[in-house]
Amino acid sequence: TQLFSELTPKRMELLDTLKRTVPQSVYRLSKVLGRNYSNVHSSVARLIELGLIEKNEEDKIFVPWDDIEIHVALSGSKAA
């Protein structure tokens, strides 16, 4: 459930935008998103920690995945 709290609407928009564009700097991404640099930088740092974003050899960020699937086990639930 922690991952769900980390994937805020703004971070999902960031991931989607980054996936559709070329690897870029945090500064450029903040301009594309029309958001404050420090907020985008914080989100990028957290998404890197979670393994959802990576940096290339030129220190530009990108999304290395086509899809992100999250499987959650529901304990105590019974199939209908």
Image: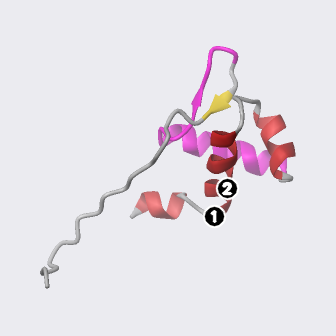
Q: Which residue is depicted at the point 51% across and 41% down? A: 52
Whether the residues at callouts 2 and 1 have beta carbons within 8 Å, the answer is yes
Crowdedness of circle 1 by 10 Å Cα count: few (<14), some, many (20+)?
few
Q: Residue furthest top?
A: 57
Q: Which mark is residue 33?
A: none
Q: Which residue is depicted at the point 57% across and 36% down? A: 63
Indicate yes or no whether the magenta region holds residue 19: no
Distance CA(mark 2)–CA(mark 1): 6 Å
Q: Is residue 24 left or right of residue 51?
A: right
Q: Which mark is residue 9?
A: 1
Q: Nearer the viewer, residue 17 or 45?
A: 17
- Quarter of the image for residue 61 reads top right
Crowdedness of circle 2 by 10 Å Cα count: few (<14), some, many (20+)?
few
Task: Say which quadrant the N terminus sits in.
Answer: bottom left
Residue occupied by mark 2: 13
Indicate yes or no whether the magenta region holds residue 38: yes
Q: Position of residue 40 (x, y in %)?
A: 74, 47
Q: Which residue is depicted at the point 37% across and 56% down? A: 70
Q: Which residues are magenta?
A: 36-58
Q: Which residue is depicted at the point 22% across and 71% down? A: 74
Q: How is the image coloured?
A: secondary structure
- Quarter of the image for residue 56 reads top right
Q: Position of residue 34 (x, y in %)?
A: 86, 53
Q: Position of residue 35 (x, y in %)?
A: 83, 53
Q: Nearer the viewer, residue 52 or 68?
A: 68
**Is the residue 45 above or below the residue 69 in the image?**
above
Q: Position of residue 75 (x, y in %)?
A: 18, 72
Q: Residue furthest bottom?
A: 80
**Is the residue 75 above or below the residue 70 in the image?**
below
Q: Is residue 69 left or right of residue 20?
A: left
Mark 1 falls on what kind of element?
A: helix
